[in-house]
Image (cartoon, rainbow, N blue to C red):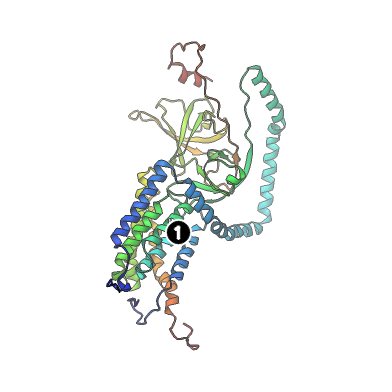
C-alpha cells in the first residue's frame, strides 16, 4: 500500500505550471502561423471538422433570407427587373460589338507582334458570410479547393475588383477584401495611365501609396488594375479617388480612394481563373545597353 | 462539491461534465452564426467558459480553454493561437477568482466578470496589433459589456440542471 495523498487532493500540476505550458503552446502556434505559415494543413483539418457545424448554423440564416425574398413585394421585383432590362439595352451596343472588337484586337496585336491576351475562365460564387474577425476584412465564399479554387485568384463582382482568395478549404475559401490593411493591388489611373499601388487603409477605405505631392491625380479619377502583377487582368475597375491632401511637409501625397465594387456588401461574386504569370525576361546578351536608366520610366508612362 | 451560491440556500447537485462540454459546444455554435460583424454581439464562448471556470474550477480549466480557442481561431479566420491564448488566460484568471466571486450576489458577480472579459479582448487586440492589423475602434470592447449583462440570465440557465431535487417529487417539477 502506498502512502500517497488520497485522490481527493490529486489535482494535477499546479495552475501556474499549467498556465505556463498552455501560454507557451499558444505563443508557439502564433509564431508558427504568423512567421512561418506552417499551420495551413492543421487549419484545413480543423476547418473540415467544423464545416458540418458551420453548414448547420448557416441553414436557418439562409432560410430566413429566402423566406424574406419569397415575401418581397412584387412591385420591388418588377422595378428591379425593369432596371436590369434597361441596363441590358444600354450595354447591348457594347456586347454586340464585343466579338468583333475582340477579333480586331487579336489581329492588331498579331500585327504588332505582341503577346496575346489570355482570358481567364470564370466561376460564379456566393458570399456565405463575413468572417467574424474584427481585425481583418475577409469573407467566405462557397467554392473551395475541390472546385479548383487556388489561393491567389482574383475575385470580382459586376462593377469591379472585390479582393483575392487567400486561403482555401475543401468546400469554402476565404477572400481577403481590398479594404484589408494587408491587401495591396497594382493599379493605373485610367485618365493618364499613371501606375501606382493601392492598399487598404482600414475603415472601408483605400489609399494610393508612395506618390509624390505634385502627382497628376485628381479627385474623381478612376483606378483600374494594371495587370503588372500577373494576378489581376488589366483594366478591371478598382476604385475612385475620393480625396487628396497635398502637404509638402510629407514626402508623399495622401490620396484616399473609395472602392467601386460593393466590396463590403455584395453577395454574388466571380472568381477569375488563375493567370499564368508572364515568363521572367531572360538576360540575353544581344540586348542593346540601356542608354540612360532611370529617366525614361516615370515620364514615359504618363504620356500615354 | 458543495458550492457557495449567493442567495439560494439550497444545495446544488454536482455538475455533470457532459453538460459543461455540451454548453461550451452550444456557445461555439452560437459564435459560428454567420452574421456580419457587429460589435454588439457577445463572445458566447468566452462568457460560458468564464462561467464554468468560476463555478467548477476542478472540472474544467485551461485545457478546455485552449481546445475551444483553437476551434474558434479556425472558425473565425483569425490567427492561429489568438483565441487559444486569450481563453487560456481567461480560464486561469477565472479559476483563480472562483473562490471569491461566488459569494457575491449575481449583479456583483457580473461586475467582477467584466474585467475578465475585457482582459480577454485586450489580449486578442494586443496580439493582432503586434502583427500589424488595423484597430477596430473602441466599440470593439462593447461586446464585453453586453456579455456582462447576460451573466444573470446565463447563471440561471446553466445552473438549471443542478437545481433538480435529489428525490423526484411529482408535485414539484423543478
Question: How far from the left and from the top, in percent, is residue B47?
Answer: 40, 63
Q: Which residue is mark 1?
A: B41
* Residue A59 figure quarter: bottom right
User: B97 above or below B121?
Assistant: below
User: B114 above or below A173?
Assistant: below
Chain to which mark 1 belongs: B
Question: How far from the left and from the top, in percent, is residue A265?
Answer: 54, 47
Q: In the current view of this chain or complex, which residue is farthest to the front? A: A1
**Residue A287 makes an appearance in the image:** yes
Question: How far from the left and from the top, in percent, is residue B122?
Answer: 34, 53
User: A172 above or below B12?
Assistant: above
SS at mark 1 in the image: loop
| Left or right position of A287 against B131 | right
Question: How far from the left and from the top, in percent, is residue A221?
Answer: 51, 31
* Residue B101 figure quarter: bottom left
| Residue nearest the viewer, comparing A156 with A248 | A156
| Left or right position of A251 against A44 | left
| Residue nearest the viewer, comparing B66 with A10 | A10
**Residue B34 makes an appearance in the image:** no
Q: Quadrant of the N terminus of chain B?
A: bottom left
Q: Label 1 crowding class (10 Å Cα cut-off): few <14, some 14-19, many 20+?
A: some
* Residue A84 figure quarter: top right
Q: Residue at x 39, y 51 (%)?
A: B82
| Residue nearest the viewer, comparing A241 with A167 | A167
Badge count: 1
Q: Residue at x 37, y 82 (%)?
A: B10
Amino acid at each position: 500500500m502506498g502512502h500517497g495523498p488520497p485522490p481527493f487532493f490529486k489535482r494535477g500540476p499546479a495552475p501556474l505550471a499549467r498556465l505556463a505550458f498552455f501560454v507557451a503552446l499558444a505563443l508557439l502556434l502564433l509564431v508558427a502561423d504568423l512567421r512561418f505559415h506552417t499551420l495551413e494543413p492543421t487549419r484545413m483539418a480543423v476547418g473540415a471538422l467544423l464545416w458540418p457545424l458551420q453548414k448547420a448554423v448557416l441553414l436557418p440564416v439562409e432560410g430566413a433570407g429566402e423566406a424574406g425574398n419569397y415575401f418581397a413585394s412584387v412591385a420591388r421585383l418588377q422595378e428591379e427587373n425593369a432596371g436590369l432590362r434597361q441596363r441590358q439595352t444600354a450595354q447591348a451596343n457594347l456586347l454586340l460589338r464585343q466579338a468583333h472588337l475582340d477579333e480586331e484586337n487579336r489581329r492588331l496585336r498579331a500585327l504588332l507582334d505582341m503577346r496575346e491576351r489570355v482570358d481567364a475562365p470564370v466561376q460564379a460564387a456566393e458570399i456565405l458570410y463575413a468572417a467574424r474577425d474584427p481585425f481583418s476584412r475577409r469573407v467566405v465564399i462557397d467554392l473551395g479547393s475541390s472546385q479548383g479554387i487556388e489561393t491567389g485568384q482574383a475575385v470580382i463582382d459586376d462593377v469591379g475588383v472585390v479582393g483575392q482568395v487567400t486561403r482555401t478549404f475543401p468546400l469554402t475559401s476565404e477572400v481577403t477584401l481590398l479594404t484589408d490593411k494587408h491587401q495591396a493591388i497594382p493599379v493605373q489611373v485610367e485618365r493618364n495611365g499613371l501606375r501606382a499601388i493601392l492598399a487598404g487603409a482600414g475603415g472601408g477605405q483605400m489609399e494610393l501609396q508612395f506618390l509624390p505631392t505634385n502627382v497628376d491625380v485628381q479627385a474623381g479619377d478612376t483606378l483600374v488594375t494594371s495587370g503588372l502583377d500577373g494576378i489581376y487582368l488589366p483594366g478591371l475597375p478598382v476604385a475612385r479617388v475620393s480625396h487628396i491632401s497635398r502637404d509638402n511637409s510629407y514626402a508623399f501625397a495622401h490620396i484616399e480612394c473609395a472602392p467601386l465594387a460593393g466590396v463590403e456588401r455584395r453577395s454574388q461574386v466571380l472568381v477569375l481563373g488563375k493567370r499564368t504569370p508572364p515568363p521572367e525576361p531572360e538576360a540575353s546578351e544581344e540586348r542593346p545597353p540601356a542608354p540612360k536608366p532611370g529617366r525614361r520610366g516615370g515620364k514615359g508612362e504618363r504620356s500615354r | 462539491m458543495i458550492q457557495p451560491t449567493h442567495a439560494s440556500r439550497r444545495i446544488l447537485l454536482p455538475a455533470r461534465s457532459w453538460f459543461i462540454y455540451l454548453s461550451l459546444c452550444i456557445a461555439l455554435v452560437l459564435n459560428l452564426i454567420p452574421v456580419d460583424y457587429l460589435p454588439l454581439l457577445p463572445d458566447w464562448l468566452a462568457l460560458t467558459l468564464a462561467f464554468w471556470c468560476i463555478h467548477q474550477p476542478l472540472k474544467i480549466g485551461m485545457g478546455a480553454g485552449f481546445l475551444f480557442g483553437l476551434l474558434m481561431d479556425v472558425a473565425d479566420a483569425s490567427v492561429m493561437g489568438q483565441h487559444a491564448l486569450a481563453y487560456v488566460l481567461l480560464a486561469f484568471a477565472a479559476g483563480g477568482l472562483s473562490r471569491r466571486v461566488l459569494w457575491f450576489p449575481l449583479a456583483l458577480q457580473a461586475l467582477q466578470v467584466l474585467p475578465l472579459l475585457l482582459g480577454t479582448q485586450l489580449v486578442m487586440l494586443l496580439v493582432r496589433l503586434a502583427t500589424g492589423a488595423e484597430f477596430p475602434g473602441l466599440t470593439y470592447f462593447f461586446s464585453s459589456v453586453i456579455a456582462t449583462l447576460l451573466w444573470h440570465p446565463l447563471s440561471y440557465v446553466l445552473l438549471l440542471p443542478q437545481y433538480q431535487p435529489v428525490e423526484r417529487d411529482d408535485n414539484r417539477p423543478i
